Amino acid sequence: MAIGNMEFKEISITDKAWVDELVALENSRSADFNFGNLYIWDRFYRQNVARLGDRMLTQLCFDGEQVFLFPIGRGPLAPAIEAMREYAREQGFPLCIKGVTEEHRELLEKEYPGRFSFTESEGFNDYIYLAEKLATYPGRSLHGKKNSCNRFCAAYEDWDFVPLGPSLFADCTDMMDRWLAENKERLHDSIVLENRAVVRGFEAFEELGMEGGALRVGGLVVAFSVGKMITGDTFDVFFEKAMMSYEGSYPMVCRETCRMMMAKYPKLKYINREDDLGLEYLRTSKLSYKPEYILKKYMARWIDG
């Protein structure tokens, strides 16, 4: 659908260049605003994108509701919001904006005082960690993680950690099958969608600029991690899977991924390990790694009248 000189279209790999340009202008540590995540989850969220000046408009389906992401980029905010209002009005749904950070909230309240209500999207807040801490597990609070790594290294002397690439994708998907069988009793239904997103990421791994590593024992993949640098100092972990039958595999793959990325990117400071989906076991796990801070997000809804 076209609105003025702007037209929404289904996202495709050909959009990466201009989306990356606007993502760089936004310079956000949020997991919501990078082309990799937009692309790999597209079959689930059915996203449409459009460029309006130096801002990106993203419309998607979330929990059965038609919503927008905050229009990232640079320049005047009002034209983007008005275009979103017009689109929502013509399509017959209320204006709701997902992924609103504290900084975005301030911008909306300044531009439209009193016209939006804000509800924290607690299950979709991002957990942000200091990379150096995840690479070393220092101090008493992370002593358990360090001990887990030590036990893993002692138990599996033939372990190694290698950069992820096409030659390992089949081994990783095989590991995902084993992982599903091992964890099926505790998993949320959304795990099927997540696995599809992993495969979609593998299919366009190099085009998306994704990176990661695989933890192996005797040549068998027992854990892997996939992500991408999303700002000059932040790496976003899209997926992290590990076989819990190999004790310590989760702390190990986290530690080794951080070490590998820090060696490659000297300015790397933060690791975004994304949200917990409101699931208690994920929240407990993410908190156990001691985040430096939690990046809060809100749903902003236009108040009629």
Image: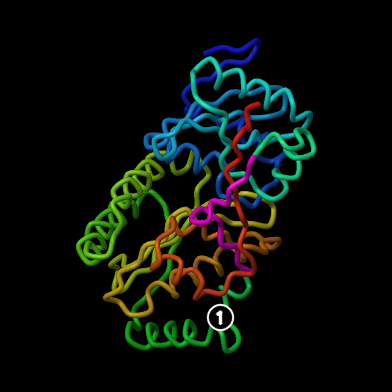
Q: At 57% across and 15% down in the image, what residue appears?
A: 7
Q: At 53% across and 15% down in the image, what residue appears?
A: 90
- Corner quadrant of residue 179: bottom left
Q: Residue at label 1?
A: 137
Considering the numbered disc 1 on the image, is that residue within a helix, a strand or a loop? loop
Q: At 44% across and 71% down in the image, what residue appears?
A: 285
Q: Position of residue 112 (x, y in %)?
A: 75, 33
Q: Main secondary structure of the magenta part?
A: strand
In front of the other: 198 or 45: 45
User: Would you place residue 168 above or below residue 75 in this image?
Assistant: below
Amino acid type at image mark 1: Tyr
In front of the other: 282 or 43: 282
- Corner quadrant of residue 205: top left
Q: What is the span of residues highlighted in magenta in the rendered image?
A: 117-130
Q: At 37% across and 44% down in the image, what residue appears?
A: 197
- Corner quadrant of residue 108: top right
Quadrant of image for the C terminus: top right
Farthest left residue in view:
181
